[in-house]
Amino acid sequence: MSLALAALVSAALQESAPASPPPLALVGARLHTLAGPEIASGILVVDGGVIAHVGPLDSTPIPAGAVIRDVSGMVLVPGFVDTHSHIGEVEGGDGSSPIQPAVRVLDSIDVRDPSFQRAQAGGITTVNIMPGSGHLLSGQTIYVKLREGRTIEECAIRTKDGAIAGGMKMANGTNSRRDPPFPGTRAKSAALVRERFIAAQEYARKRQDPDPEKRPARDLALEALGECLSGARIVHHHTHRHDDILTVLRLREEFDLRVVLHHVSDAWKVADEIARAGVPSSLIMIDSPGGKLEALDLSFDSARALHEAGGKLCFHTDDGITDSRLFLRSAALAVRAGLPRDVALAALTLEPARMLDLGERVGSLEVGKDADFVLLSGDPFSVYTEVRETWVEGRKVFDRASPADRLMAVGGPGAGSRFLSDCCGGDGEVQ
């Protein structure tokens, strides 16, 4: 091919390639950046899926050619990060054993399930999808961006080496206590966990044997436990009662695990111990009694108590225990019990991002971070405030002004599925 012909082909290819969308400047909203003081009237510029500029109205540049949108009167916050959810009809381990680290929820998530859309309607942009808590260890979790994806791979967050990011789900207390082979007591539960982690330590040591003939065959379960032991995989640990919480802290110290405590209904009883251990907590805020006996002493005071003790905290939905659309209310309930407002907002955004090792990408409105943000109609902690729009990586994934999206936000016929068949009066459109 001649140089002239090659140049013509190159020019034609460039002309046929889809043009990148111009920068978008959102102007006039009250900004909660989580990286500095609140900005009463500011500008957020999005370019190429990331934040290009953010700051006050009178000193933040708007690139030439940018689409300018006036969002005065709205409140703009980082996208919410949910550290504990079960959207996508996820499944984990079965009844064959109480510890199943080889199980991956990656293999059981339906990204087209409407629970994804309902989470978007709640302002959630990043989520840790986990199996249930009926096992001592029920499988590997997955960190997901709530993009408009057709497959879980399109939504999965990846680590720098390209691997799918996620943690490990563990639990103690009453959930995992049942007939053999499951444990019948709390002490037996802890003993089984110790046995498996010790086995993983031995496996890792033997796999390093210089003689290939002496190395054990690959064991996917022990490999996954080894990732927890090395710190590559965070343990997300369901625990409620104060003594169960202390058992988790004990195991964490014995095996040098990276742990996030989940639920921690009795956190207010052992807040000093949790803070002293340097272990973060992800709390659930349930506004009605019931559920399980070990959560009998659940209190809205836990968040304040952890904060005052110096502990790190965030909130989660445990969807469907708490509806993803009501995630803001979790923080509002903690504010009502005395948690400072700035701490509560960080507990929906930056703190949970850090608990998933994603703080460099999401959780605050800073230049270079993913353009994940939410437009609210008013004060984040007002019962009257609505999520108006949710954006992931510079793309709008929820718009309350859209009838289909509004249906997902408020519920009603059709909100339980993406499609209505002709037999039900639908036309195949998203409902």
Image: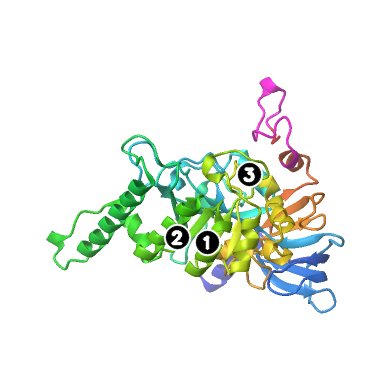
At a point 69% along the width and 36% down the height, the residue shown is 430
SS under mark 2: loop
Crowd tier of the residue under label 3, counting other residues whose Cα lies within 10 Å: few below 14, some 14–19, many 20 or above: some
For the record, the magenta segment spans 409-428
Residue type at the position of mark 1: Leu
Q: Quadrant of the C terminus?
A: top right
At a point 12% along the width and 60% down the height, the residue shown is 213
The residue pinned by badge 2 equals 234
Numbered circle sitting on residue 356 = 1
Marks 2 and 1 in Cβ contact (< 8 Å): yes
The residue pinned by badge 3 equals 322
Q: Is residue 422 magenta?
A: yes
Q: Which secondary structure dominates the residues rendered in magenta? A: loop
User: Splitting the image into 4 quarters, where does residue 66 fall?
Assistant: bottom right
Q: Nearer the viewer, residue 406 or 295?
A: 295
Residue type at the position of mark 3: Thr
| Residue 95 screen position, x and y as percent | 37, 36
Q: Nearer the viewer, residue 383 or 43?
A: 383
Res 63 visible: no
Q: Is residue 81 left or right of residue 225?
A: right
Q: Which numbered disc flags the more N-terminal residue, 2 or 1?
A: 2
Q: Which numbered disc flags the more N-terminal residue, 2 or 3?
A: 2
